[in-house]
Image (spheres, rainbow, N blue to C red):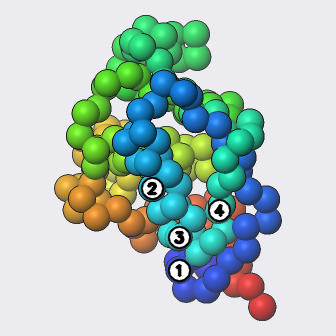
Amino acid sequence: MVADPGECPGVCERPISYTLDAGFDPDQRALVEQAMHVWERGTGGRVCFAQGGRDLVIQKVGRPEDLEPWDADWSQHIALSKAGHIWIVDDSVSDAGTFRALLMHEIGHHLGLGHVEDTPMSYMHSRVNDTPEELRVHPRLPERDGRDFCAEHRCICAP
């Protein structure tokens, strides 16, 4: 097992094919791709994404109420990740770093990670506002998130 996926290179056995909602503007699309790249780099190449598929569909919804069919607590959320979908409430986050942090968080859920509250340096807090400014400005996969990914996916060093 690998505690830190950056310790040794990994192999992406199967790319996660994804589709982005056409409603995302070019800047938002670039931030989604940046978030994916941070996950790829931070997992030592164990995660990879390929545009044009249905493994992960990232959609924009107009209002929090639009989350209701998938989430009974919809009124408390600005995004939701479930069953191969990530829904982002339109214009819920206007700051670019916070928007990218929100995507990092939701991709983390898609990859099997849960919420953590025992460390400040994580994207996986239950509230995106709790993401440290350092991660919003300088995106990277924190050690805790990398360790949790490896625990979930049983990372090993390639021979």
The residue tagged with tag 4: helix, strand or loop?
Answer: loop
Quarter location, residue 96 = top left
Query: Compared to 140, does 107 lie above or below?
Result: above
Between the C-alphas of marks 1 and 3, the distance is 8 Å
Given residues 75 and 17, the one toward you in this image is 17
The residue tagged with tag 3: helix, strand or loop?
Answer: helix
Between the C-alphas of marks 4 and 3, the distance is 8 Å
Mark 1 and mark 3 lie on one chain; the one further toward the N terminus is 1
Q: Residue furthest left?
A: 133
Q: Answer yes or no: do the residues labelled 2 and 1 have beta carbons within 8 Å?
A: no
Q: Nearer the viewer, mark 2 or mark 1?
A: 2
Between the C-alphas of marks 4 and 2, the distance is 14 Å
Q: Residue furthest front?
A: 26
Q: Residue at x 48, y 24 (%)?
A: 23
Residue at label 1? Answer: 6
Between the C-alphas of marks 2 and 1, the distance is 18 Å
Mark 2 and mark 1 lie on one chain; the one further toward the N terminus is 1
Mark 2 and mark 3 lie on one chain; the one further toward the N terminus is 2
Residue count near mark 3 (Cα–Cα under 10 Å), binned few <14, some 14–19, many ≥20? some
Between the C-alphas of marks 4 and 1, the distance is 12 Å
Amino acid found under the numbered disc labelled 1: Gly
Residue count near mark 2 (Cα–Cα under 10 Å), binned few <14, some 14–19, many ≥20? some
Q: Residue at x 74, y 85 (%)?
A: 158
Left or right position of 37 against 47: left
Q: Nearer the viewer, mark 1 or mark 3?
A: 3
Query: Compared to 56, does 42 lie above or below?
Result: below
The residue tagged with tag 1: helix, strand or loop?
Answer: helix
Q: Residue at x 69, y 84 (%)?
A: 157
Residue count near mark 4 (Cα–Cα under 10 Å), binned few <14, some 14–19, many ≥20? many
Residue at label 2? Answer: 34
Between the C-alphas of marks 2 and 3, the distance is 10 Å
Q: Answer yes or no: do the residues labelled 4 and 2 have beta carbons within 8 Å?
A: no
